[in-house]
Image (tube, coloured by chain):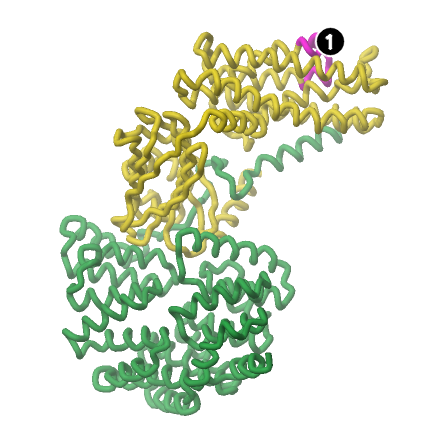
């Protein structure tokens, strides 16, 4: 299996090795004093600058790249300077990945950092590779929250300055609502937890067997109870964590979230948790709140914006959550009478969620990244 | 229960293959991500490394800089790899913005600038070099090429004339034949070129491949398909990797409605965008199974080139817009933009084709006049001019 997958990737990246002048792709998001981003640099260029092909066999392997991650980060970040109102920001490489672009494989670094103060004017100086390839270009996308700017850096134009427009309060608030929705929409673990909770909501357990729920009214009441309990619970811990009153190590929070998804999904197959689902939602929801909080904490918001951002972000999470409910529950209610719902949706669906969350649990508890999602 | 487990296992396996086009962590250390130049095997790369370290110590070492830049320009031409041009330019960095750089630097700088379609500064570099060294054959030849590409045929002919006393006859005759072939004298150009090719067998293969390709193009322009076919094959026998010759032969085969041969000539995994365009055109004409996939790949590559501000592929992009995406007004806009800097017969042809498709003969009035006054030949051009006249 492994050899087969490797062969497939080999084909994919070889087929994509087209000829193009050299570009790197830099995206930066600036929120308050925090900076996050991603930087894609062609492996061909890094090989040219740093000789990645250690054994000189003409093939750059993941092992050869992995062994040089420290140097790659130092080389790249040494060529990138970010200044907020004249004071240098600090940037580090958080994760190293790879990606295929139209002209071959790229090293991908996710970036994290912070600036000394909230930037009114951001200066970016980019000098990667210019001394080796005078036609290299740095293609940057700079997300300042209220606006996204793009820029091309070249040997002739290595330094550019971007003035942030002053954001109004409603704009800031809207940006945090959007961040919350985005976090819910991309947080597959939270969505799977909600689905695992709601899958049996249109059924009634009688003597160990699932039967379709009769009327819409009681079903909606049940769903509302579950959703409200989850909301109350995660809002409590989200607030406590963001305000710095209670903090847990994020590794264990993430692992515990995976465990909560696993247990809820398994309970759909073999009952062992409390029969009242809102209790499950309430207890596990406390964990998910700590998970939501990590996003806001990473943003290192100034105290003045904290209450506003907390409320906006939480509102965004609830909107995202209600969207999931609004799509899922009507479909599930209509399908509840079919045997396929119990076998495929509840049975196979819960089993699949359990398997995925077990993968996350192992990945997060032992810090061995292997899950594709 | 068993079907359920099997189903889940299958789904999970499907998930375990990372999606292409998303940042991911490869499955293990042995996954090959990219091809590199095998260092132990390549003497040229070894030399380039030595020259680079010499330049790191002493950036204004003219000899090392020239040797390194020449190495990259040649490598870039051999592989059709624009990255090498940037590396050559970096080697010449100390002189890149000097108006009065050494003559050799001026000529090489012009070559690099011509390759990135900066024709005006390239021409200025060459004129400056020739003012100081009027017997520089390479400078006259490159100047003739720049003049011809930009449509200054009278000046190009004069530059070619200077080569008579400075270069082997094949170079002088090929230079002149290229200009004559674009200005109403394709028959004479072809017979002159054929005579000198027959008289000088075993010429330096690069020059001979260039001459054979031109011979084929002249034969195509004068409706001698069999001669064209023979000459294209002779050119590719001399240099099978010559991207210009492959592209010209592919265009010939496309005109002859023989797309399947284009697919065999180029192959689906070409790294060169201009060749991928021909492959896509042929794949669509032949109804090949991978036509849609290759079309997508090419669109992504054009988008990537546009994102960095490249204007090198305007002619190819115009052909893509006209013949693949079917957006004739976009094709016309690209072709007209291209015409501002490039004025070869192929540039006139795509502009006229796009204007005809967009039912906009007015915007190409100047190009029609140019084609008539320079007496541009060829069946396709004649057909287009006639059709535009009727429109």
Give the magenta range: A265-279
Q: Is residue A340 magenta?
A: no
Residues A294 and B278: in front is: A294
Q: Residue at x 63, y 67 (%)?
A: B286
Q: Is residue A43 visible?
A: no
Left or right of A224: which side holds A142? left
Q: Residue at x 32, y 57 (%)?
A: B84
Above or below residue B305? Residue A42 is above
Q: Residue at x 62, y 35 (%)?
A: B13
Q: Is residue A275 magenta?
A: yes
Measured from the top left, where is residue A186 in percent x and y? Answer: 56, 30
Measured from the top left, where is residue B340 in percent x and y? Answer: 40, 69
Choose top left, top right, bottom left or bottom right for residue B82.
Answer: bottom left
Choose top left, top right, bottom left or bottom right for residue A83.
Answer: top left
Residues A268 and A92: in front is: A92
Above or below residue B165? Residue A355 is above
Q: Colour of chain A?
A: yellow
The chain displayed green equals B
Q: Chain of mark 1?
A: A
Read off the residue under disc 1: A275
Q: Is residue B138 visible?
A: yes
Left or right of A37: which side holds B3? right
Q: At numbered mark 1, what does the secondary structure look like: helix, strand or loop?
A: loop
Query: Which quadrant is home to the C terminus of chain A?
Result: top right
Measured from the top left, where is residue B351 in percent x and y? Answer: 49, 72
């Amino acid at each position: 299996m492994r050899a087969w997958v490797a062969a497939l990737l080999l084909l994919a990246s070889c087929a994509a090795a087209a000829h193009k002048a050299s570009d790197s792709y830099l995206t930066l998001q600036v929120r308050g004093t925090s900076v996050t981003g991603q930087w894609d640099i062609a492996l061909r260029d890094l090989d040219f600058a740093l000789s990645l092909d250690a054994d000189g066999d003409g093939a750059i392997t993941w092992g050869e790249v992995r062994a040089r991650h420290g140097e790659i980060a130092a080389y790249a970040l040494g060529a990138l300077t970010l200044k907020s109102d004249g004071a240098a920001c600090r940037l580090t490489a958080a994760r190293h990945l790879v990606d295929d672009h139209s002209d071959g494989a790229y090293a991908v670094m996710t970036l994290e950092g912070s600036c000394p103060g909230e930037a009114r004017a951001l200066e970016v100086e980019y000098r990667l590779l210019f001394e080796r390839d005078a036609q290299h270009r740095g293609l940057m996308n700079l997300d300042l929250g209220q606006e996204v700017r793009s820029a091309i850096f070249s040997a002739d134009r290595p330094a550019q300055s971007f003035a942030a427009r002053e954001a109004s309060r409603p704009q800031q608030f809207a940006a945090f609502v959007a961040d919350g929705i985005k976090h819910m929409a991309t947080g597959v673990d939270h969505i799977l937890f909600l689905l695992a909770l709601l899958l049996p909501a249109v059924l009634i357990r009688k003597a160990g067997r699932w039967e379709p729920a009769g009327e819409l009214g009681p079903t909606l009441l049940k769903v509302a109870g579950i959703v409200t309990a989850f909301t109350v619970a995660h809002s409590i811990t989200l607030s406590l964590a963001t305000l710095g009153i209670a903090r847990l190590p994020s590794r264990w929070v993430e692992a515990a979230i995976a465990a909560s998804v696993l247990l809820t999904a398994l309970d759909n197959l073999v009952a062992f948790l409390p029969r009242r689902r809102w209790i499950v939602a309430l207890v596990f929801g406390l964990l998910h709140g700590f998970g939501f909080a990590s996003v806001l904490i990473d943003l290192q918001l100034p105290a003045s914006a904290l209450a506003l951002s907390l409320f906006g972000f939480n509102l965004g999470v609830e909107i995202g959550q209600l969207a999931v409910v609004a799509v899922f529950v009507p479909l599930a209610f209509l399908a509840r009478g079919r045997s396929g719902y119990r076998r495929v949706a509840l049975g196979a669906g819960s089993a699949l969620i359990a398997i995925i969350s077990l993968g996350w649990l192992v990945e997060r508890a032992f810090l061995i990244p292997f899950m594709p999602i | 229960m068993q079907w359920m487990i099997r189903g889940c296992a299958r789904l999970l396996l499907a998930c375990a293959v990372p999606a292409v086009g998303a940042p991911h962590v490869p499955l293990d250390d042995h996954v090959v991500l990219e091809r590199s130049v095998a260092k132990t095997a390549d003497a040229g790369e070894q030399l380039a490394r030595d020259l680079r370290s010499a330049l790191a110590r002493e950036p204004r070492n003219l000899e090392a800089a020239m040797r390194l830049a020449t190495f990259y320009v040649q490598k870039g031409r051999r592989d059709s790899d624009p990255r090498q041009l940037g590396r050559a330019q970096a080697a010449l960095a100390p002189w890149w913005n000097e108006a009065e750089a050494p003559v050799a630097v001026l000529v090489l700088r012009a070559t690099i600038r011509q390759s990135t379609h900066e024709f005006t500064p390239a021409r200025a570099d060459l004129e400056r070099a020739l003012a100081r060294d009027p017997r520089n054959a390479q400078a006259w030849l490159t100047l003739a090429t720049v003049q011809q590409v930009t449509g200054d045929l009278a000046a190009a002919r004069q530059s070619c004339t200077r080569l008579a006393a400075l270069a082997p006859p094949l170079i002088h005759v090929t230079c002149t034949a290229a200009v004559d072939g674009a200005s109403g004298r394709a028959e004479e150009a072809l017979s002159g070129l054929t005579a000198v090719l027959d008289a000088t067998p075993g010429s330096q293969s690069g020059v001979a491949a260039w001459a054979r390709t031109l011979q084929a193009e002249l034969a195509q322009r004068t409706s001698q398909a069999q001669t064209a076919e023979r000459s294209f094959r002779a050119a590719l026998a001399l240099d099978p990797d010559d991207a210009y010759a492959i592209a010209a032969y592919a265009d010939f085969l496309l005109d002859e409605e023989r797309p399947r041969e284009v697919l065999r000539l180029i192959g689906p995994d070409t790294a060169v965008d201009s060749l991928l365009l021909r492959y896509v055109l042929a794949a669509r004409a032949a109804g090949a199974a991978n036509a849609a996939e290759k079309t997508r790949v090419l669109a992504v590559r054009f988008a990537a080139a546009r994102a960095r501000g490249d204007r090198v592929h305007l002619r190819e992009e115009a052909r893509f817009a006209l013949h693949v995406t079917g957006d004739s007004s976009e094709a016309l806009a690209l072709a007209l933009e291209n015409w501002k800097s490039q004025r070869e017969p192929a540039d006139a042809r795509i502009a006229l084709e796009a204007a005809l498709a967009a039912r906009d003969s007015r915007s190409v009035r100047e190009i029609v006049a140019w084609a008539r006054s320079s007496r541009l030949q060829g069946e396709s051009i004649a057909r287009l001019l006639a059709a535009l006249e009727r429109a």
